[in-house]
Amino acid sequence: MGFGDLKSSAGLKILNDFLADKSYIEGYVPSQADVAVFEAVGSPPPPPELFHALRWYNHIKSYKQKSSLPGIKKALGKYGPADVEDATGGDSKDDDDIDLFGSDEEEESEEAKRLREERLAQYESKKAKKPTLVAKSSLLLDVKPWDDETDMGKLEECVRSIQADGLVWGSSKLVPVGYGIKKLQIQCVVEDDKVGTDMLEERITAFEDYVQSMDVAAFNKI
């Protein structure tokens, strides 16, 4: 069980295939399992062609307090597909099995590499037969103005002017926050591998004449 070496292209390919029909490493909400695998991937993020892994990576990266996510972090080899060899470490050899002269080291290494490549090929063959699901999320965004004199109609017009493949705007309403100030609460549906919360925040807050800040009030998988 495991993803192999997540610093290698082969390991990232396994992670990408694993996430093709999943939003998270375990279950239906982000957890310490995602944190463990995220930390193992490190930086830079997965390349764009591995869009399932990149979508997941950017989503987990958006959580500032990752330690607050539920669950208990386990060894990296405890996560991932069951039919992939754990490359994060193993039991030490008994003294009787140690070759003091290292004469068979190269041969054993080639054999291990051959077995790993066979297992990867089998795994990729299984994944190729599964239909690809489009992962979507429903977001509720809170967009706050600078003050009570901000034109909220113009603010909403600016927000809805943001168009992207995989982004659909929904209903909206103005919610009082105090001192005569109202915030815009607006719904949208996004395709996870195309639109992330970081991108939405960057583009919405770019309307700095109207927008003070943007927060994700609710995030639900569809």
Image: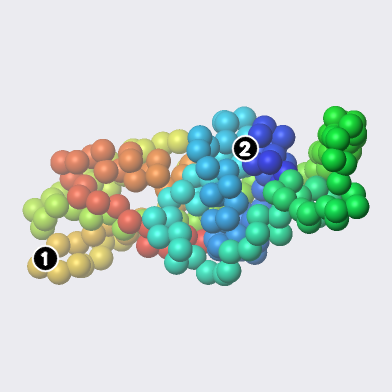
Q: Residue at x 57, y 31 (%)?
A: 48
Kind of residue at disc 1 = Gly
Where is residue 102 shown, x and y percent of the image?
85, 35
Q: Quadrant of residue 180?
A: bottom left
Where is residue 1 shown, x and y percent of the image?
78, 54
- Is residue 117 in view? no
Q: Is residue 192 above or below residue 51?
A: below
Q: Quadrant of residue 36?
A: bottom right
Kind of residue at disc 2 = Lys
Where is residue 57 shown, x and y percent of the image?
53, 45
Q: Could you tell me how many numbered marks the image carries? A: 2
The quadrant of the rendering that contains the C terminus is bottom right
Which residue is disc 1 drawn over?
180
**78, 136: nearer the viewer:** 78
Q: Which mark is residue 7?
A: 2
Spatial separation of the CA atoms under disc 1 and disc 2: 52 Å
On screen, residue 169 versus residue 180, left or right, reads right
Where is residue 141 shown, x and y percent of the image?
36, 56
Indicate which label's residue lies in the foreground, 1 or 2.
2
Q: Secondary structure at mark 2?
A: loop
- Is residue 123 in view? yes
Q: Are marks 1 and 2 in contact (CB under 8 Å)?
A: no
**92, 36: nearer the viewer:** 92
Q: Residue at x 50, y 52 (%)?
A: 60
